[in-house]
Image (cartoon, rainbow, N blue to C red):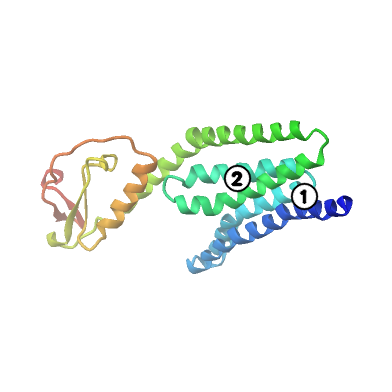
Amino acid sequence: MKGKSKKPINKFLYWLPRILSILFIAFISIFALDIFDMNLGFWGTIVGLFMHLLPSLILIGALWIAWRQEIVGGILFFFFGVFYVFQTIGTHRTWSLIIAGPAFLVAILFFVNWILKGKDKKFRMVVSIAIMLLLIVLGYSFNRFFVEPNMCKSFHEDVESQLEQANHCEQDSDCDVIMLGGKYVEFGCHHYINMNENKTLFYEQMDVYNERCSKIIDKCAPSPTPYCVNGKCVSLTET
């Protein structure tokens, strides 16, 4: 009886991470379909679709390797989860768990497969735990020293570009001021924008930036009154 009950358990453990991997990859691939709503044209859509599907393609490669080498699958899926957590935990905690959670589960199941295959199970368990701890440290270090600085710079430039595009006018009454300073000081003390622009959206983006990137707190002087000059809102000191 014991010999008969052992085989289906092994089959279950063998197929579980593989089936979950396929479902997980299919799930994250669904988000790539948003590209069809962006009206980017044929080639823009093709390139955008490829970029959106890149994580799925990487995971398909990881699954192909993991099918025979479970420890490699455990490492790759666990690192994917770690990387995603450090990328999103500060701003999208819910999505961080939704995406990284299944990746961690799949990784652990691959590690379990690898552990049960060997005779030295205790040693393999210690190795698996050590690998996961090392991946957490490496993932944090990689994100902290390589990814975040570039991401923060790009995010800052994007917000600055949007503020610049929001500065347009035809007459003085079109001009408005978005007050910054304080926790928003990295974007200046104030920006002139068109009165019809949504200030809340800018503040929300800057809040996301501050939560992930900014450590500066400062105060600024009050903004001068804006005037419309040559299609741009400016202060008299700038004219």
Alpha carbon of mark 1 to alpha carbon of mark 2: how far? 17 Å
- Please name the amino acid that badge 2 sits on: Phe
Along the horizontal axis of the image, is 119 left or right of 179?
A: right
Q: Tell me if 215 is positioned left or right of 22 in this view.
A: left
Residue bearing mark 1: 67
> Residue 80 versus residue 106: which sits nearer the camera?
106
Which three-letter amino acid code belongs to the residue tagged 1?
A: Trp
- Coordinates of residue 61 in the picture (x, y in percent): 71, 50
Classify mark 1: residues with Cα within 10 Å, few (<14), some (14-19) or many (20+).
some
The residue tagged with tag 2: helix, strand or loop? helix
Considering depth in this image, is 112 or 6 the residue closer to the camera?
Answer: 6
Query: Could you tell me residue 62's position as x and y percent?
Result: 70, 48
- Which is more toward the observer, 142 or 137? 137
Residue visible at 79% across and 53% down in the picture: 9
Of callouts 1 and 2, which one flags the residue occurring earlier in the amino acid sequence?
Answer: 1
Q: Which residue is mark 2?
A: 80
